[in-house]
Image (cartoon, rainbow, N blue to C red):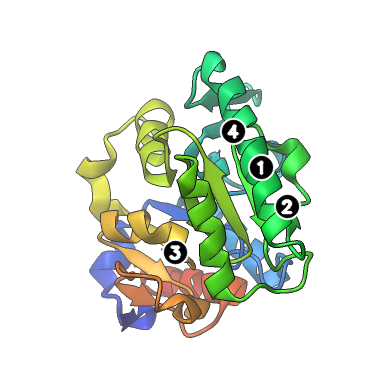
Amino acid sequence: MLNFSEIPTEFANKIEIIFCDIDDTLSYKGKILPETYSSLWDLHKNNIKVVPITGRCAGWVDHIVRFWPVSGVIGENGSLYMYMDKKNCLRKRYYLENHQVQESKRKLELIKNEVLIQFPTCNIASDQPYREFDLAIDFCEDVPALPMKDVQKIVKIFEKYGATAKISSIHVNGWFGDFDKLKMTEIFANEVLGFDLKGKLDTMLFIGDSPNDQPMFEFFQNSVGVANITKFSDLITKPPKYITKKKSGKGFAELVEILLKKRN
């Protein structure tokens, strides 16, 4: 991985959109730091769109899209997106049809029960009541940290039931359905931003921090990892092209500072 400070001016001048993870990419030890939030406004002032893409719940997405300077938010690992329209009204788009949701919830309940029996120090994520499509197992956010070998066993339980499961920096997220962060990003770009994602890759970048960001790292030619991504080096087979010197939200602020300084 190249240090992000090595990007050429031509790269910086072309960027129009930043897609980004939230936990441990925008946040730092669970908080959005002043410099990170300010960097979002700096991007906004420079007409660079920001679209967070997160495993966090629909409830969080509703809040973020209303109160942050962003062009939309993709949540629950690609099961939905929300944005504010020109009249400042909230708009939502779900990936699954209504009839698919109830069966999904039934099977996720079975998975939850099995995981919590096998790993009693874990818990469902505190934001689970505000999720619409996935199950999030907390393995280190509000509970004692679980060894990574046991986190991977939780993934196997999801997969045994036929669910997709991804490891973030704090949760194992699992769901039924063929959506993921990348698929919904392509849909969002087409339906909200008005272009084909593949046709404008040189005008955007993605920044993330964990194994569930791998499809994004592989897809985006301008992919970036914040410095804390190195703790997942054994689990990431498709690393980002660039890396920041600083971790988490400080790394995001570093990226923005470098990007804007190199533009002319």
- Foreground mark, 1 or 3? 3
Tell me where residue 159 appears, x and y as whole percent: 46, 48
Q: Residue visible at 78% across and 51% down?
A: 126
- Foreground mark, 1 or 2? 2
| Mark 4–mark 2 distance (CA, rounded to whole Å) | 17 Å
Query: Which labelled disc corresponds to residue 57?
Result: 1
Q: How crowded is mark 3: few (under 14 residues within 10 Å), some or many (20 or more)?
A: many
Query: Which labelled disc corresponds to residue 150?
Result: none
| Mark 1–mark 4 distance (CA, rounded to whole Å) | 19 Å
Outermost residue, top direction?
99
The kind of secondary structure element at disc 2 is: loop
- Foreground mark, 3 or 4? 4
User: In the picture shown, does residue 138 fall above or below 62?
Assistant: below
Tell me where residue 140 appears, x and y as whole percent: 70, 68
| Mark 2–mark 3 distance (CA, rounded to whole Å) | 18 Å
Q: Residue visible at 57% across and 42% down?
A: 76
Residue that carries the numbered disc 3 in the rendered image:
211
